[in-house]
Image (cartoon, helix red, strand yellow):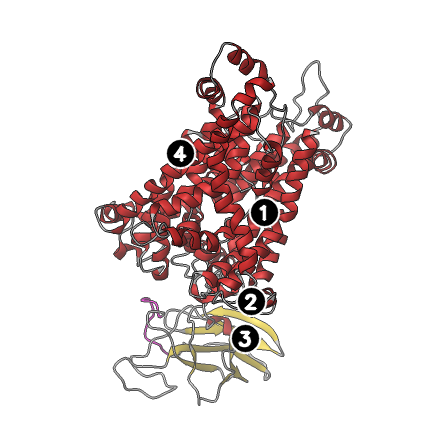
Amino acid sequence: MSLRSPRRGRASGGALRRHRGLALLFVLPALLLLGALVVYPIGYSVARSLFDASGHRFVGLDNYGTAFTDHATLTAVRNNAIWVAVAPALVTAVGLVFAVLTEKVRWATAFKLLVFMPMAISFLAAGIIFRTVYDADPHRGVLNAAAVAVHDTFNDQPTYPGAHLRAGGGLDQAQGGDVTAPAPTRVVLLPLVGVQPGAVPATARTAREPAAGDGVSGTVFLDFVPGGGGHPGRLDAGKKGLPGVTVQLRDGGRTVDTTTTAADGTFRFGAAPSATASVVIPAANFAAPYRGVDWLGPAFITPAIIGAYIWIWAGFAMVIIAGGLANLPRETIEAARIDGAGEWQVFRRITVPQLAPVLGVVFITMVINVMKIFDLVYIIAPGPVQQDASVLALRLYLVSFGGGNDQGLGSALSVLLLLLVVPVMLLNVRHFRGSRA
Amino acid sequence: MTTTQAAPPATTTVPAPTPAGRPALPRTARVAALTRSGLVQAVLTVAAVAWLVPTVGLLVSSLRPKQVAATGGWWTALTEPAQLTLQNYTALLGGGDVPKALWNTVLISVPATLLTVALAAGAGYAFAWMRFPGRDAVFLGVVGLLVVPVQVGLIPVAKLEGAVGLFGTVPGVVLFHVGYGLPFAVFLMRNHFLEIPAELLEAARMDGCSEWRIFRTLALPLAAPAVASLCIFQFLWVWNDMLVALIFAGNDSQPLTVYLQSQMRQFGSNMDVLAPGAFVSLLVPVGVFLCFQRFFVQGAMAGSVK
């Protein structure tokens, strides 16, 4: 919104003097409310911030000192700085990209409608939406479900997570590492335990010795007889083979051959083994399956919430920038194209510079908005990581009303918040005066 | 600047070989242009999906009964649509806290909107067309208040309302919203009233119309689009608010946002309440958005400084 004032109100003095009383009637209700609810609170907050929690003891600037030394508040200040540094630029950039790209497709209106819609809904609803999107459990959070699906498409999935070698059989396995049978004999028995219930497929058959033949062969089996019985490390009746295990034949650190176990757990390498060769079950067979990213954990919580913020505000940036784009003179762009400029050059050297004022408005608007961010953080960050995601406005709320019960510190935080927007306030006033002169 | 407006003239990246125009591009350039347009389509399609999926997820989640929701993600419903029912909604809206909270949301939003717009229209008109001592200085002050964060008012106004017994009541919440809606509302109304030609108002005065009548029958109707934008903007602002109500509303006056917030503690085990509740709370704003897109965009743009 440009702060403009096209014409000053003017009318004959006589008529106006008669209406002075009426004018007061028109403005007074609004001014009284503004005075009591907005202006007075500014003064009150400044004064209150100089007193302690009880409100009786004058403490000078102590509350401001606390704001910059107290760990929880410092985290909030730091996160606010991250928000201001990252979110407005990203929202503006995404909005710009969308605005420019939608000019080139037929379904631009539908796209704009879709992307702008989140503007209408509350931060609370958006927060609930993204709390589920970011759920760490891939069976609940759609983002991790997608991440796991993509990951598993390009990577082998572990077949028996958590399984490990039965200790004491002459083979070795470092904690969570490869199972290695050094200098193998012709037949290697690899007894595993710790297989999760349900991990053994229904197609698994009773483990047996591999058929005699050339090279190295062996059996990977579950060294456990349901209901008890059998001897550790031996192929007793009732023990199941473990199909689908990746087995490698290595020699001097080099993988010579790779195979997968059959339904009865047997495998075979055709080549005759050298004396230095070893049979290895790579640790990847036992790794925990990929579960996606812990979006709501302490490390990713702020980026995750910024992601939700972009989802809400990119449409706003897009619509305003698209409006600016529609008003740009087309001649320069057409001329540049005729002169052989590529799309990227046109974008960088003509479109963006010409759009600079609009981009500036969007950016500043987002900066003001981001400074006061509260709802999204309060809703998306789960209790245990709330502290890691905290921002000024959230800290202010918690300190003053959410159990902190220290309205002295709360007032100091609100004054800080106000100070942050004072430059914009002055800009607004100056701009307004300038446009009237 | 609206989303409904016709798309700006598309700048075709593939210059067609017109008889009178430029010669056709060489084949490689045409292929490159086609690839580029395919890329644009792909990028926008991915973005559209990313923007659509979260909301669809909420909608589908809200339609899954609790027992089913425990068995897997909402997307499993895409292959087994039979699991979708309205029972969460009937349970939620059939009784208990939600209908009351929804009603409170209405009781807060409607008066807060009407009051703000009415007071701002009067003040805006006076700032535009009436003369009184200190008018311009006072208005400059209003411009300065545009960006004051609501957070500044929380503690002092809570004290103030506590002293007069309004704290924790619906009127208390309404009052706060009116106060913090006014700077922008007055600013918007005054600017729109100023766009009325002075001659029009002068002519009405010559005809002996009272200032009140000019305001009611001439200025207000002419500023109707601005009034509509302001109504929609302020209504959505209040409807969607959580922070103010979290502090100023009591147990009996809490709106839907505060009720749902109180449910966040059990997040995960109560999606049968949260998902349909959130969906109900966003139905009204999205409906308003779809019905009044033009005004909505204007209002959101003008009010984005809040």
**CA gap, disc 4 and disc 3:** 79 Å
Instruction: Please state which amino acid type lies under the numbered disc 2.
Output: Phe
Question: Which type of secondary structure does the marked residue at label 4 adopt?
Answer: helix
Q: Residue at position x 66%, y 41% from top?
A: A427
Q: Residue at label 2?
A: A58
**CA gap, disc 4 and disc 2:** 42 Å
Q: Nearer the viewer, mark 3 or mark 2?
A: 2
Q: Chain of mark 3?
A: A
Question: Which type of secondary structure does the marked residue at label 2 adopt?
Answer: loop
For marks 2 and 1 on the same chain, the one whose residue lies earlier in the sequence: 2
Q: Nearer the viewer, mark 4 or mark 2?
A: 2
Magenta highlight range: A200-208
Q: Chain of mark 1?
A: A
Q: Chain of mark 2?
A: A
Q: Are marks 4 and 2 in contact (CB under 8 Å)?
A: no
Instruction: Please state which amino acid type lies under the numbered disc 4.
Output: Leu
Q: Residue at position x 48%, y 36% from top?
A: A30
For marks 3 and 2 on the same chain, the one whose residue lies earlier in the sequence: 2
Report the quarter where the N terminus of chain B lies: top right
Residue A368 marker? 1
Question: Which type of secondary structure does the marked residue at label 3 adopt?
Answer: strand
Q: Is residue A180 left or right of residue A202?
A: right
